[in-house]
Image (cartoon, rainbow, N blue to C red):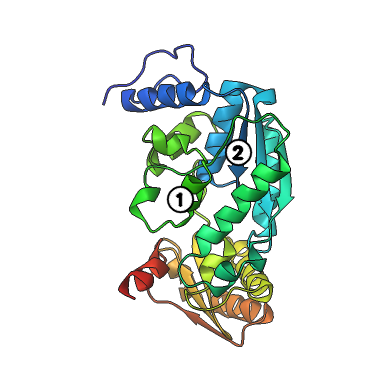
Amino acid sequence: MSVSRRSPDNPLVKPGLPVELVSKARLLADRLSRHKRVLIAYSGGVDSSFVAYSARMVLGRDGVLAVVADSPSIPRRELVKALSFARRHDIPCETVETNEDKEPGYIANIGERCYFCKRELYSVLRTTFASGGFDTVICGTNADDVSDYRPGLRAADEMNVENPLLEVGLTKEDIRALSRAHRLDTWDKPALACLASRIPYGEEVSPDKLARIEAAEEVLWKKGFKVFRVRHHGELARLEIGEDELNRFQDLELRERIFNGVKEAGFATVVLDPEPYRSGRLNEALEKK
């Protein structure tokens, strides 16, 4: 594999990067430099953190504003982390309240939930910051996202939201590698979808359900788990744990503490899924329907 020997005059290129990543980093910088000021749909995840950081490096502090949606579907822990990342990297950042939980299509959760959520977010961004002199709204969609069921992409397309990472062909693996090269602590952050994704399609989304899920997942966070989901099935919570951590449940004392903590979060019954967590699992059930 060829690597770069020196860093060209490009803030996104670091010495030692594989040549193909250097090429993509140059394309990304060029893509972002076409704008004077961008509004960033920011969540604090691997992708949106990298695109916010990249825009800040290319356009300067006055050229960016990252905006985090503050809604019941966003864990408080993640909101705090997102704001902290922005502060550490001198990225101007604000929060806005979104009201996707008032949208019937979102509440019904029959397969297009993400579309209604993203449409609400992008509408609020454009309305709230209409006088800010922004050229465009950008988000962190990457090249891998188009291979999964992502109704939110349709909302971005309808509202002319740009996807610079996708446009230059950056995959999740590429983004992690570039984030690591820039010493961003998000480089190995586990993927974390919104809390509503823990509710199976066809079951309504409500603030009460989201609060219970958040409280239950906090139990696992405090025990040091990194990759997991607490699936909401009425009074039953089903724990999906990442393959590398599933064997921790062989510790019966730990298992009992976790189960009791999840019950205290509002569930009557807790079960451990014997299959490891994998991304897109609920989408598989939707495809069958």
Nearer to me, 1 or 108: 108
Q: Around disc 2, counting alpha carbons within 10 Å, would you say few (fewer than 14), some (14 to 19), or many (20 or more)? A: many
Residue 63, given in percent of the width and then of the height, sits at: 65, 25
On the rendered image, what quadrant is the C terminus found in?
bottom left
Residue type indicated by callout 2: Ile
**With 63 as the anchor, is 250 left or right in this view?**
left
Q: Residue 179's spot in the image, x, y percent?
A: 49, 34
Question: Residue under circle 2?
Answer: 40
From the top left corner, tell me how far across and down residue 91 is, in percent. Answer: 67, 32
| SS under mark 1 | helix
Crowding at mark 1 (Cα within 10 Å: few <14, some 14-19, many 20+): some
Q: Residue at x 72, y 32 (%)?
A: 132
Which of labels 2 and 1 is toward the front? 1
Instruction: Please provide percent x and percent y for residue 22.
Output: 38, 23
- Of residue 195 and residue 121, the one placed in the foreground of this image is 121
Q: State the residue position of label 1.
A: 153
Residue at the left extreme, as displayed: 1
Kindly identify the residue that appears in the image at 26 percent across and 26 percent down.
Answer: 1
Question: Could you say whether the residue bearing mark 2 is in a helix, strand or loop?
Answer: strand
Tell me the tag on residue 66. Answer: none
Figure check: 252 above or below 183? below
**Residue type, label 1:** Leu
Q: Is residue 110 above or below residue 179?
A: below
Disc 2 or 1, which lies upstream in sequence? 2
Q: Quadrant of residue 177?
A: top left
